Image (cartoon, grey):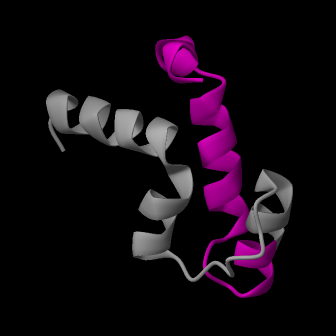
Amino acid sequence: MNPFNLMQALMQIKQNPMAILGQRFNIPQNLSNPNDIIQHLLNTGQVTQEQVNQAMQMRNNPIFKNFR
């Protein structure tokens, strides 16, 4: 993925995270709390703990601080 596409994807996630996540993951509409969503994805095997850990590391990377 080129840097422009990555930045565009991050902006889309920031604007409407559920729409973007819903394209890839099966998330019940009644879930809106990020922790509940992560737990659901782990419980249903849609993501691994390692993937969650990697995402958390990325979130803490100074490069991504502007996207919060």
Instruction: Measuring from the top left, give residue 26's x and y in whole percent.
Output: 57, 83
Residue at position x 58%, y 20% from top?
61
Question: Image quadrant of residue 12?
Answer: top left
- Location of residue 5 with respect to 7 vertically, above or below: below
| Picture quadrant of residue 39 | bottom right
- The picture places residue 34, in percent across and down from the top left corner, at 77, 53
Residue pictured at 19% horizontal, 38% vertical: 5
Q: Which percent across, then down, holds residue 54?
A: 61, 46
Taken as a whole, is the magenta stretch helix, strand or loop? Answer: helix
User: Is residue 65 or residue 13 the one in the foreground?
Assistant: 13
Please give the count of numbered marks on the rendered protein: 0
Residue drawn 43% across the image and 59% down it: 20
Above or below — where is 10 with respect to 41? above
Image quadrant holding the N terminus, namely top left
Is residue 13 positioned above or below 38 on the image? above
Residue found farthest to the bottom? 44
Placement of the C terminus among the 4 image quadrants: top right
| Magenta span | 40-68
Say if the magenta span includes residue 54.
Answer: yes
The answer to if 19 sits in the magenta stretch is no
Q: What is the quadrant of residue 42 in the picture? A: bottom right
Q: Is residue 20 left or right of residue 2?
A: right
**Residue at the image point whose x is 62% and y is 31% from the top:** 59
The vertical placement of 66 against 47, above or below, is above
In the image shown, does 8 or 63 lie closer to the viewer?
A: 8
Q: Is residue 22 left or right of residue 4?
A: right
